[in-house]
Image: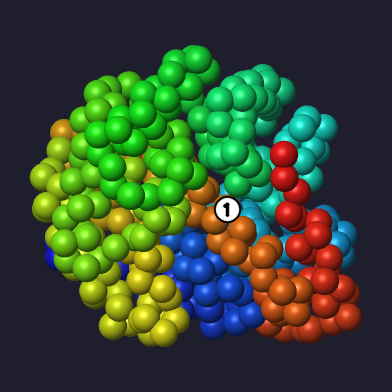
Amino acid sequence: MKDWVKEKCDLLIKNREAIHDKFKFEDKLMSVSAALIYTGEGREADVERLKECRKILRKNSGVFSKFRASVELALLTKMEMSGDPEKYINDVKDVYKKLVKTKTGDNAYTILAAMMVCEQGKTDSADELIERYSELMKLMNDQHPMLTSTEDISYAMLLALSDRPVKLIINDMEECLEYFKKTCKIGIDSNSLQGLCEILAMSDGDKKAACDRITGIYKKLKEKKAEFGSSSQVLSLAALADIEAEPEVLADEIFETSEYLSGISGFEDKTLEKENRLMFSAILVGEGYGKDSPTIRNTYINSALEIIKAKQTAMIVNILINMVPSILSGLVGSDEETTEDTLSEGNKTKKELDDRH
């Protein structure tokens, strides 16, 4: 394992421990997700500030607000890192309200999409971005109605934030999807394939070469009995599609990273599924190579990582909203209090968040 990858792992471990200690009732995947956001910025988690941000969030949202449900910890992390938590949450709410007025729906994925707009400092052009986003979602839904769902909202918005023409994005997605199915045949489900293709469509370049690189890494990991399965964790490999290193080298780095994390509390098999550990490992390796190598397009890697993290967070939200309400009620509660209001919120979360197109 390269030294800079180990340094990232150690920072991720430290951040997860700090967040978990103060937010014990949060889902383990969401705790790692929040820790990963800090790690990507090379920062240590400021848990006291996170707790202050929770108070600000609750002051600016109702008891049953979706802002205080499954996506809360990711939102708190972004609030804290913004430097002005109150302005950040108000900006997100403003963009969110505009999105809800479209056919996007009133759900946690829409919150993630609003966060992406604010992260890019595009609140002033939110209306234009929402038009691009709506056009993208419509075309995606027209071509693949069975594959396009609420889970696509957050990273479809990131695609809208790119400068590429909408029709070119859709054409590139179709090219990648056809190539994956007819040539690569890596055996992952159609939803995950569409996700990979959406990420690859963010940039110019040889799409088939990018598909080949992802396929090579996937197969090399499979040879090591390190399999993503057929789920959306495999999206993390898209961050490596533009890196000029041999697939075997990248697969070795991901495998070694996963093995290293497997011996750490909070990342071991009994706590974190192997597929999820591989997902986080691939993101760490992608971040490291993205900043270490001058031969790659850093803009693409950074954007790809953001879109993958959004999808990863959306995937975690999807897991949470399909759990039984009694489990959810524990996840949305505070480590400082378990109130009747919190339990009521948990009982409503699945119904309120599971909106579909």
Residue 35 x/y as whole percent: 46, 65
Which one is nearer the viewer's eye here, 11 or 252? Answer: 252
User: Is 30 left, or right, of 245 in this rendering?
Assistant: right
Residue 177 x/y as whole percent: 39, 32
Q: Which residue is painted at 76% across and 67% down in the image?
A: 55
To which residue does mark 1 refer? 314
Question: In the picture, which quadrant includes the C terminus?
Answer: top right
Q: Dot 1: what SS? A: helix
Is residue 194 visible from the viewing direction of this image? yes
The three-letter amino acid code for the residue at tag 1 is Ala
Question: In the picture, which quadrant includes the N terminus?
Answer: bottom left
Rendered image quadrant of residue 256: bottom left
Which one is nearer the viewer's eye here, 27 or 55? Answer: 27
User: Is 92 left, or right, of 21 in this rendering?
Assistant: right
User: Is 220 left, or right, of 282 in this rendering?
Assistant: left
Q: Which residue is painted at 38% across and 77% down in the image?
A: 267
Residue 354 x/y as whole percent: 73, 54
Residue 231 x/y as whole percent: 44, 56
Is residue 136 visible from the viewing direction of this image? no
Q: Which residue is most to the front?
A: 182
Near mark 1 (Cα within 10 A), the count class, few <14, some 14-19 or many ≥20, is many
Rendered image quadrant of residue 62: bottom right
Q: Which residue is painted at 56% across and 31% down in the image?
A: 144
Up-down relation of residue 167 to residue 109 (above or below) = above
Q: Which residue is painted at 61% across and 29% down in the image?
A: 141
